[in-house]
Amino acid sequence: MTENELDEAPAASERVPCWRGRTVALAPLDAEDAELMHAWRSDPVAAYEIGFWPRSLTSLRERLERDRDDHDRDDFLVLLPDGTPIGHIALVDQDMVDGTAEVHLMMDPRHRGRSHGSDALEALTDLAFGELPMQRVQAVTHTGNTAALGVLAKAGFVQEGVRRSACLHRGRRLDVAVLSLLRAEWEAQARPRSWDL
């Protein structure tokens, strides 16, 4: 997808934020957002860093429809104060008994490197620990994804291990870093919480 096509990617319909960070807000993701997400997922940097290849728009729309009915996940658009969607963040594989979940984050290529990803992660962990009974939130990325590792560290995630040769990407075996944020670590963070903003 060319830069012009990204610029022309359809905007999401008007969204009402349900959760806030310092510089971003979160709004529930809807199947109508498939074209927007498809444009982000078609970015070659995102495909490399996250380790996926773009699927068809129809396939993505069907997945979003299925995910909407999955009670073990919460998906959100990341919005700027003016309502511009700049990313997708999700809390998936929620286990309310063990108090664990995993976070996924993907940012619009034009809005990377501006601390919006870290802010979105902080907002989502506020939701996970402040409104849900989570004790541990995990993130997984390959060890060469320095941008994601930096965003996660800035949001307080600690690398706890490496799964060696855990994924195949572009013909090479890659190691995968496992990071987490525990409830006690989140409680110790000296920053305003989403409900204080």
Image (cartoon, helix red, strand yellow):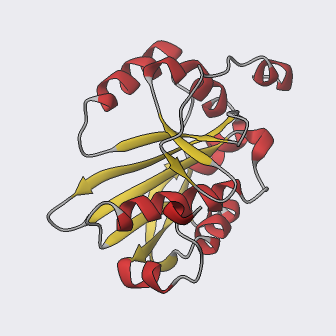
Which of the 4 image quarters holds residue 132? bottom left
In this image, 89 relative to 39: left or right?
A: left
Looking at this view, is 35 or 171 the one in front? Answer: 35
Which of the 4 image quarters holds residue 59? top left
Residue 139: tell me if it is visible: no
Looking at this view, is 189 or 155 the one in front? Answer: 189
Residue 172: tell me if it is visible: yes
In this image, 29 relative to 147: left or right?
A: left
In this image, 191 relative to 185: left or right?
A: right
Looking at this view, is 94 or 83 the one in front? Answer: 83
- Horizontal and vertical percent position of residue 3: 84, 26
**At 25% from the left edge and 46% from the top edge, which residue is drawn?**
72
**At 73% from the left edge and 60% from the top edge, which residue is drawn?**
115
Location of residue 30 with respect to 95 vertically, above or below: above
Location of residue 161 with respect to 37 vertically, above or below: below
- Horizontal and vertical percent position of residue 188: 48, 86
Location of residue 68 with respect to 139 vertically, above or below: above
Q: Tell me how many marks there are.
A: 0
- Horizontal and vertical percent position of residue 105: 54, 50
Query: Can you name the residue that lies furthest to the front here?
Result: 196
**At 54% from the left edge and 65% from the top edge, which residue is drawn?**
196
Query: Can you name the residue that lies furthest to the top here?
Result: 58
- Horizontal and vertical percent position of residue 34: 52, 21
Indicate the quadrant containing the N terminus: top left, top right, bottom left or bottom right. top right
Indicate the quadrant containing the C terminus: top left, top right, bottom left or bottom right. bottom right
Looking at this view, is 77 or 82 the one in front? Answer: 82
Query: Can you name the residue that lies furthest to the left here?
Result: 97
In this image, 162 relative to 110: left or right?
A: left
